[in-house]
Image (cartoon, helix red, strand yellow):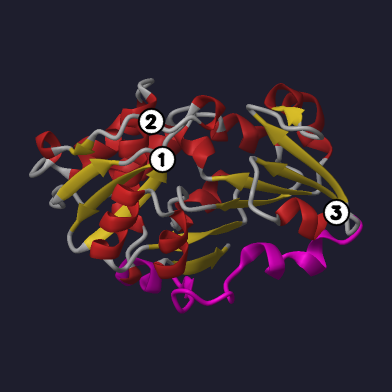
Amino acid sequence: MWQLYDTLIENIDPHRRVDYACCGSWRALVESGGNCGIASLLLKNAVPAQNSGLLTNYVGKPLRDLAALIKGWDYTESALGMAAINAYYNDDRILSSNGARLFTPGMDNGDIFKALLPEVAGKKVALIGHFRGVDELYRGRCELTIFEREPREGDLPDAAEEYLLPDMELVIITGMTLTNKTLPRILQLTQKAKVILTGPSAALTPLFFDFGVDIVSGLAMPEASVCRRAIASDDWQDIYNNGRKVILNK
């Protein structure tokens, strides 16, 4: 079950160091080599975490060491590990070398959910996690099922994935499943489906293609100063306005 995580960690440049790390109330941020990565914290009942601010104890350490925290069970540390992984892979230079499509920050183009509209028509589609506005966008176009760890009205609990995911034709997965360790099992259950991993917490790397993912999409954060302010002020919109949407196809 750890193979996916070990692959992500081991492919990080061993010479990269942590330049900056912090946690806001909703997200973690790590900077390395002029690039930054973010990851959402796993919060029960959507209650903001206590803002722990700048984490100087990680600065100067190998980025790989911080990334390895993704394998732990302290979910704040796990989110920091995910942000460290993203600080490496969600870098314009690496993304360009991997053939990713990079879109202009703040623009609506590069929206993976709209790009998938022709493919969802008439299919059994699963969302693992909530994505803003997507249930309204897809309802009536497909047979839509939403799985959530903390279900809202109309959702199914994530325990239902064991029974229903093998019958799905297209599955869209939040990057937070990397942090909570559920992604490896989800990928085992979706071998017959087209699988998309997406969201600000997703590491934008073709390494996922060897594990059953067909498309990876999310955000690269080219402006570290903007990202720091957004994390500190919990301004989600500023993150989306300044993040560069990315789509990486198998």
Would residue 121 be found to the left or right of residue 40 on screen? right
* Label 3: element kind: loop
User: Does residue 62 appear in this view?
Assistant: yes
What is the magenta range? 93-122
Earlier in the chain: of badge 2 and badge 1, it is 1
Residue displayed at 58% across by 62% down:
250
Q: CA distance from mark 2 to mark 3?
A: 32 Å
Residue 187: name its quadrant.
top right
Residue displayed at 62% across by 45% down:
173
Check whether the beta carbons of the residues at disc 2 and disc 3 lie within 8 A of each other: no
Residue nearest the viewer, comparing 233 with 95 = 233
Check whether the beta carbons of the residues at disc 2 and disc 1 lie within 8 A of each other: yes
Residue 66 appears at what percent x and percent y?
Answer: 23, 37
Q: CA distance from mark 3 to mark 1?
A: 28 Å
Disc 3 marks which residue? Answer: 139
Disc 1 marks which residue? Answer: 26
Q: Amino acid at mark 1?
A: Trp
Residue nearest the viewer, comparing 224 with 201 = 224
Disc 2 marks which residue? Answer: 49
